[in-house]
Image (cartoon, rainbow, N blue to C red):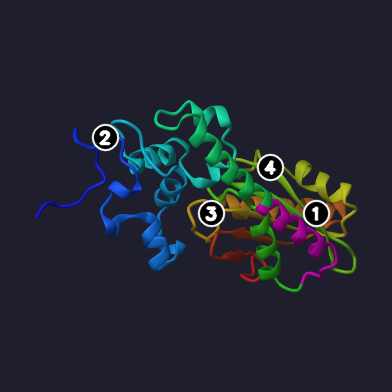
Amino acid sequence: MKKETYIDSKSEINLSMKDLPKSSLPRERLRDYGINNLSDSDLIAIILGRGVKGESVMTIANKLLKEFGTLGNMLDASLQELENMKGIGFAKATQISAVLGIARRVHAEKVNAEKERVKSSAVYSPEDVANQIRVEMTDFFKEHFYVVSIDVRNKIIAIDNASKGTVSSSLVHPRETFRCAIKRIAAQIIVAHNHPSGDKQPSDDDIKITRRLVDAGRIMGIEVIDHLIITQTGYYSFKENGII
């Protein structure tokens, strides 16, 4: 029996969703099994609707995802970037841009609502803080360093994204870290960063940086009460593990 495939052949021209095997149709699988069972490429293919001459809709969807790497990276894609890709064109580019625009607005609403909640919330546990930072973070594939400023009543004043890139002693300098705390008139702070690898365990550099910040905090009179390593599914607390 011939195996069904999404791979283009000379006979596959201008393929749309209806040309794909029934069991492979993303729209039907979404209906039957739910959106969580669809790949990123499937979701993009549903938005595109059909392919172009010589390229199936799934081929275009896969190329688009490969170009940007992740759906998170696509959020910043311009209409021109999308339109210039082979097989997209103006009409499909506007469809994708509209969906991305909705995603950005929904995320912004969620972040703003969380920020309002944070203003009146007290710090009860490292998990509380990790969850709040996770809401702020849109791209888990890049390293972000956060400074959580806390007042004398143990309430969060603000969560600042102090730097983005590779967390190192040169990037996470006490000067930048405590600049955020001083600006917020913080009595104490929690610092946090993510590991794109998904590994929650601290590296030797993480431990060195933490001790450096704790020492600087003693001099500044602003206590560093914890350092959190955050992943999409969990966190590591230096305080809970006796490092601070």
Amino acid carrying mark 3 in the image: Ser
Which residue is at the front of the view, 29 or 236? 29
Q: CA distance from mark 2 to mark 3?
A: 51 Å
List the residue tagged with mark 1. 217
Q: Is residue 188 left or right of residue 232?
A: right
Residue stretch in magenta: 106-123
The answer to whether 15 is drawn above or below residue 186 in the figure is above
Sequence-wise, the earlier of marks 4 and 3 is 4
List the residue tagged with mark 4. 163
- Residue 134 lies in quadrant: bottom right
Is 193 inside the magenta-drawn segment? no
Q: Position of residue 189 (x, y in %)?
A: 79, 58
Main SS of residues in magenta: helix
Amino acid carrying mark 2 in the image: Ile
The answer to whether 59 is drawn above or below residue 112 in the figure is above
List the residue tagged with mark 2. 13
| View extreme (left): residue | 1
Q: Is residue 215 left or right of residue 106?
A: right
Sequence-wise, the earlier of marks 2 and 3 is 2
Frontmost of labels 1 and 2 is: 2
Mark 3 secondary-structure assignment: loop
Kindly check if marks 1 and 4 are in contact, taking CB atoms under 8 A apart as contact.
Answer: no
Q: Is residue 78 visible?
A: yes
Q: CA distance from mark 1 to mark 2?
A: 65 Å
Mark 1 secondary-structure assignment: helix
Sequence-wise, the earlier of marks 4 and 2 is 2
Q: Is residue 203 left or right of residue 124?
A: left
Amino acid carrying mark 4 in the image: Ser
